Image (cartoon, grey):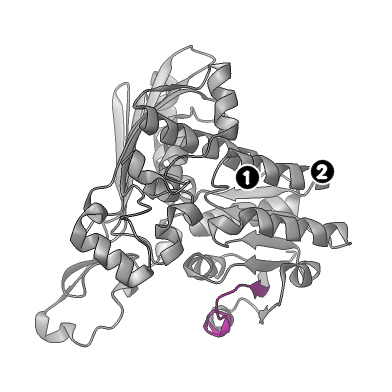
């Protein structure tokens, strides 16, 4: 098996999580990282996982010539700048077998189009990371029901959710840097997995045609005085001046072009789920069958009493975004695999080695960006957005949500 040399742009939480996933993928050697964050701890972490002998590079242009694959795990506001530096390195002679971009692909459509304009002429294979589509339980549900779907038809309605108590870093809370609030941060996941779960087996991921998007956004918990003060104190983000949504829900309607039937995907995301930790949920209903997933249902439970809790330092050892260090805890022994991070890295690596297309490429990422923007526009207008209307399609190409502009107080 050909070993692929990975260079990672970014040194925060997502980069660390992907290292945990890459340790479960054969034939990957992480050669280095580029990040504005200190990298000593992350370098040691990657080495201890057996990912090679990575080093810190001073710049993307310096790192790219040493790589076969570059993975972009940097903050959202840096996407375009990162891709520009990668492209400059390739034009200067560096040769790449693949490019990876973590969600969200871009903060808006102008950025998404700019990225594609930069990369498309190079002809480098791309992989877009939406981990929930790669979750083993999602794939197993589809495989188990494939004969049923062949007889009865694909699902007619799916409902997806992703909720936790809020992001790790200050820039995630800042709508002008992140691109919005929870809709930008996690809504993209639900849009993608909902679309995928509705798609008939054997059909491309973009087989169903998006017709319309309806969404409602709100600032609930983190708009209250006590929690606004905590955000300002902890992260320096003032939701009194530039608020973002901490709750979003909505519906996307799709058309099956072969049957002319309409199907629907409902989504709900929030940054105020103060329970065990991160919860991913998905359920679907078809003619005569159904399926349901909840990531907090673990085969392992741990109980920690008050006396013992004083010795526990890191609640997230049990579960991402864990909110408690005592009581009955849900423990997921391998979150990177559970959430699909391992399998999306396997898919990308195999695609880059063999030349086959990955399940999701950057064109798919552009389309998820468009649906996310449609959700923001729907919430602003308090109306359903018709994606088949040429004028609306043209408007979305230039649209910057008010929340992303720092004008969230006008719409929340």
Question: Which of these two is toward me, 96 or 394?
Answer: 394
Name the mark nearer the viewer: 1 or 2: 1
Q: Quick one: SS at disc 2? A: helix
Secondary structure of residue under mark 1? helix
Compared across the picture, whether 126 is left or right of 207 comes to: right
Residue at 25% from the left image edge and 53% from the top image edge? 223
Q: Quadrant of residue 65?
A: bottom right
State the extent of the magenta-drawn residues as a range. Answer: 31-45
Q: For the N terminus, which image quadrant?
A: bottom right
Please give left or right for residue 226 compared with residue 36 in the image.
left
Instruction: Give the residue at mark 1.
Output: 111
Report crowding for label 2: few under 14, some 14 to 19, many 20 or more residues within 10 A (C-alpha).
Answer: few
Residue at the image point whose x is 42% and y is 34% from the top: 375
- Label 2 sits on residue: 121
Q: Residue farthest to the right?
A: 93
| Residue 355 lies in the magenta stretch | no
177 shown above or below 33: above
Question: Badge 1: how crowded within 10 Å, few (<14), some, or many (20+)?
Answer: some
Mark toward the start of the polypeptide (1 vs 2): 1
The stretch drawn in magenta includes residue 44: yes
Instruction: Give the residue displayed 31% in from the left and 58% down from the top.
Output: 278
Residue at 67 percent across and 57 percent down: it is 81
Q: Which of these two is toward me, 78 or 30?
A: 78
Q: Is residue 60 left or right of residue 65?
A: left
């Amino acid at each position: 098996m050909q070993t692929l040399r990975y260079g990672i742009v970014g040194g925060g939480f997502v980069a660390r999580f992907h290292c945990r996933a890459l340790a479960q993928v054969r034939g990957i050697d992480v050669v280095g990282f580029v990040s504005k964050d200190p990298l000593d701890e992350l370098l040691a972490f990657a080495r201890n996982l057996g990912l090679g002998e990575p080093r810190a590079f001073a710049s993307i242009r310096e790192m790219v010539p040493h790589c076969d694959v570059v993975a972009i795990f940097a903050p959202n506001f840096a996407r375009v700048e990162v891709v520009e530096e990668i492209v400059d390195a390739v034009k200067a002679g560096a040769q790449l077998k693949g490019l990876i971009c973590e969600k969200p692909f871009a903060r808006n459509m102008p950025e998404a189009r700019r990225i594609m304009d930069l990369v498309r002429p190079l002809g480098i294979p791309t992989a877009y990371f939406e981990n929930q589509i790669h979750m083993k339980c999602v794939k197993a549900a589809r495989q188990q029901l494939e004969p049923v779907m062949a007889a009865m038809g694909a699902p007619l309605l799916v409902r997806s959710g992703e909720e936790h108590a809020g992001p790790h870093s200050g820039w995630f809370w800042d709508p002008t840097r992140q691109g919005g609030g929870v809709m930008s941060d996690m809504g993209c996941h639900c849009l993608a997995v909902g679309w995928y779960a509705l798609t008939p087996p054997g059909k491309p991921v973009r087989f169903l045609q998006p017709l319309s998007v309806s969404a409602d956004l709100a600032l609930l918990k983190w708009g209250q005085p006590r929690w606004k003060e905590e955000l300002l104190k902890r992260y320096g983000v003032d939701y009194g001046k530039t608020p973002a949504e901490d709750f979003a829900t909505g519906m996307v309607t799709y058309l099956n072009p072969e049957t002319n039937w309409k199907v629907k995907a409902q989504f709900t995301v929030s940054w105020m789920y103060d329970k065990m930790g991160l919860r991913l949920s998905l359920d679907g209903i078809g003619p005569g069958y159904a399926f349901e997933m909840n990531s907090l249902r673990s085969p392992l439970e741990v109980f920690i009493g008050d006396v013992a809790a004083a010795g526990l330092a890191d609640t997230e050892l049990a579960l991402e975004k864990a909110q408690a260090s005592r009581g009955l805890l849900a423990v997921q022994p391998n979150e990177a695999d559970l959430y699909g991070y391992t399998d999306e890295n396997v898919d990308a690596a195999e695609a880059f080695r063999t030349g086959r297309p990955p399940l999701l490429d950057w064109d798919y990422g552009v389309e998820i960006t468009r649906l996310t923007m449609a959700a923001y526009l729907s919430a602003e207008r308090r109306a359903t957005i018709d994606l088949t209307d040429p004028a609306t399609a043209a408007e979305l190409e230039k649209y910057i949500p008010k929340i992303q502009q720092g004008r969230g107080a006008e719409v929340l």
